[in-house]
Image (cartoon, coloured by chain):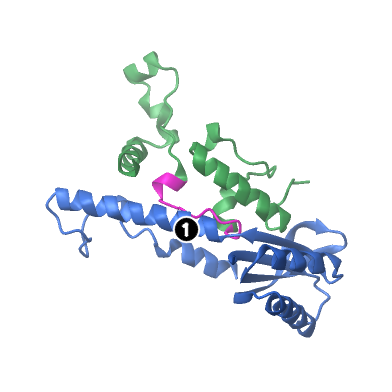
Chain colours: A green, B blue
């Protein structure tokens, strides 16, 4: 289960970053107006089992400016890991490691 | 029934080192009285809080890993709530999650080994083989590095 996901991630990542949209207009651009990079769950790809509330470095990318939790549709995190991420973020917030809001 | 808990508490920045140490001994005493043990204590030192808690902008974080019963943690929780020096605390039960993580890790190495054998390779990775994506060592040091920077 993990193996297949990983290989997908590797392929998608290699094909092009989001910045490659403009360069890839061609026939692809006509069929689909925008080329989106396949989103991959960071925790599945990097095989991070333990989403710990103490690890602020890991959690910070998932709470952008306004300090709201980044939704799954944007981050691409899988359901299981999003759940774990949520509890971790909420615990970290209680301990004032991560803000609840930004101003 | 002993369980494993993690307790993190934030001590007011005005507290002296001696007072922080005293809080630790208090926790230890409660643990001893109710048949628990403290596995590990970790003082993260003074850190800036992500938001202000009352008048405080920083605090001293202390992490304790405690083996003990639910009643013990209840008592510690009650005592910490009462204490004036402690501005925030959190108790989390960790034993169940740890076993789950362990199981997931084991299962992953198992499947990886099986696949490697099926491909006619030795079950363990040889040094200097394959690309980065194939790293089988999921306890890689990236995590530890992060933690090291934190403290």
Q: Residue at x 33, y 60 (%)?
A: B137
Task: Label 1, secondary structure: give it.
Answer: helix
Q: Residue at x 50, y 55 (%)?
A: A50
In the rendered image, residue B119, in percent from the top left (x then y), is placed at 14, 48
Please rate how many residues cluster around mark 1, counting C-alpha atoms within 10 Å: few if below 14, some from 14 to 19, many from 20.
few
Compared to residue A44, the image places residue B125 above or below, namely below
Considering every residue shown, the one lying at the far top of the view is A31
Q: Which residues are magenta?
A: A43-55
Q: Nearer the viewer, residue A59 or A103?
A: A59
In the rendered image, residue A33, in percent from the top left (x then y), is placed at 44, 17
Callout 1: residue from which chain? Answer: B
- Please indicate whether residue A24 sits to the left or right of residue B46 in the image: left
Q: Main secondary structure of the magenta part?
A: loop
| Residue that numbered label 1 is attached to | B99
Q: Nearer the viewer, residue A23 or A58?
A: A58
Quadrant of the drawing holding the N terminus of chain B: bottom right
In the rendered image, residue B144, in percent from the top left (x then y), is placed at 48, 66
């Amino acid at each position: 289960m993990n193996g297949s996901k990983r290989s997908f991630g590797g392929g998608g990542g290699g094909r092009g970053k989001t910045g490659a949209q403009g360069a890839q207009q061609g026939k692809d651009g006509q069929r689909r107006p925008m080329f989106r990079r396949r989103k991959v769950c960071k925790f599945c790809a990097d095989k991070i089992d333990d989403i710990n509330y103490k690890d602020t470095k890991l959690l910070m990318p998932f709470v952008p400016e306004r300090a709201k939790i980044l939704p799954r549709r944007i981050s691409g995190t899988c359901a299981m890991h999003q759940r774990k991420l949520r509890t971790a973020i909420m615990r970290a917030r209680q301990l004032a490691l991560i803000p609840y809001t930004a101003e | 029934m002993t369980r494993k808990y993690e307790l993190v508490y934030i001590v007011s920045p005005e507290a002296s080192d001696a007072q922080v140490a005293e809080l630790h001994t208090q926790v230890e005493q409660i643990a001893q009285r109710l048949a628990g043990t403290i596995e590990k204590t970790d003082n993260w030192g003074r850190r800036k809080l992500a938001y202000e808690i009352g008048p405080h902008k920083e605090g001293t974080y202390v992490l304790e890993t405690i083996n003990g019963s639910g009643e013990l943690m209840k008592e510690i929780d009650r005592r910490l709530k009462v204490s004036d020096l402690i501005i925030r605390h959190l108790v989390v039960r960790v034993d169940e999650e740890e076993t789950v993580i362990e199981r997931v890790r084991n299962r992953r190495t198992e499947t990886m080994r099986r696949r490697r054998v099926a491909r006619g390779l030795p079950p363990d990775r040889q040094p200097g083989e394959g690309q980065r994506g194939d790293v089988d060592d999921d306890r890689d040091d990236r995590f530890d590095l992060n933690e090291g920077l934190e403290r």
